[in-house]
Image: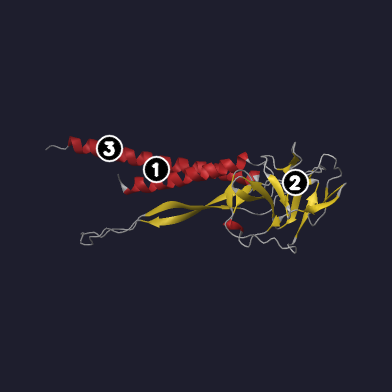
Amino acid sequence: MENASLVGLSRQVALRRELDVIANNVANMNTSGFKAEQLAFAEHVMPKARDDQFPRPDRKLSFVEDLSTWHDQSPGVMQTTGGANDLAIDGDGFFVVETAGGPRFTRNGAFQINAAGDLVTAEGARVLSTAGPVQFAPTESGFTVASDGTITTSEGVRGRLRIARFANLQDLQKEGGSLFSSTATPDEAANIRSRVVQGAIEKSNVKPISEMSRLIEVTRAYESVTGMLAKQDDMRRSAIERLADVPA
């Protein structure tokens, strides 16, 4: 296969991956706490042939490589809901929740209270305080959360929410819609510059107009590469047909 076709195919693979990322962002525009994803591309230069004694030396070929996916950790719009179970973080930090795989971190504060009295995420992961899972007795009422995360009910103070902060947000690995994991040790000191807001949730930080513009741009680029590859096939077919007509 010719070099032009190989380079074009590498570009198509990268564009297809970018289309998948954009489609996932668009699908989660209304997911609370969702962080948009972006692709980072890099140039991959094909190594030279070992034998440099050709009449015309090899020329380097550049291919496209989708190097990594990074997350836009900028905050989303804070929407007031008035619900006592809805919490948002104004500033740095993540809520800490308990999953089967260990502690996970989220900005999605659309919590619920299950039948056992646990404060949980929509997926059922228990929200953690500094003393363990947040749980309420059937007789408790008046659930309030102060700006520092202190939980109070009719039975008095019940603890303080765990708010985790990371020095490098790109170390976080996405798990599902709005959950993140990390091998780094989070900073859970009391002086974290953030406050908890009750009765509000953080919306997705996806920018719909920007994502739709990118979708159109990437689609056109994919079609352009497809057209180039089709012309290469036509040229190859035409060359083969002409060679077949040359007298032996």
Q: The N terminus appears in which quarter of the rendering?
A: top left
Q: Residue 39: horizontal and vertical position, in percent?
A: 53, 51
Marking on residue 119? none
Q: What residue type is labelled 2?
A: Ile
Q: Nearer the viewer, mark 1 or mark 2?
A: 2
Q: Is mark 1 on a helix, strand or loop?
A: helix
Q: How far apart are marks 2 and 3 (CA)?
A: 62 Å
Q: What residue type is labelled 3?
A: Ser
Residue nearest the viewer, comparing 39 with 5: 39
Q: What residue type is labelled 1?
A: Met
217 versus 43 height, above or below:
above
Residue holding disc 3: 238
Q: Is mark 3 on a helix, strand or loop?
A: helix
Mark 1 or mark 2, earlier in chain: 2
Q: The C terminus appears in which quarter of the rendering?
A: top left
Q: Distance between the residues labelled 3 and 1?
A: 15 Å
Q: How far apart are marks 1 and 2 (CA)?
A: 47 Å
Callout 2: 10 Å neighbours few (<14), some, many (20+)? Answer: many
Labelled pair 1, 2 in contact (Cβ < 8 Å): no
Residue holding disc 1: 228
Q: Residue 146: horizontal and vertical position, in percent?
A: 82, 54
Position of residue 186 in the picture relative to residue 47 (left or right): right
The structure residue drawn at horizontal position 53% and vertical position 42%, both measured from the top left corner, is: 20
Residue nearest the viewer, comparing 52 with 141: 141
Marking on residue 201? 2
Callout 3: 10 Å neighbours few (<14), some, many (20+)? Answer: few
Outermost residue on the left side: it is 248
Res. 163 image quadrant: bottom right
Res. 239 image quadrant: top left
Mark 3 or mark 1, earlier in chain: 1
Callout 1: 10 Å neighbours few (<14), some, many (20+)? Answer: some
The answer to whether residue 212 of the structure is visible from this angle is: no
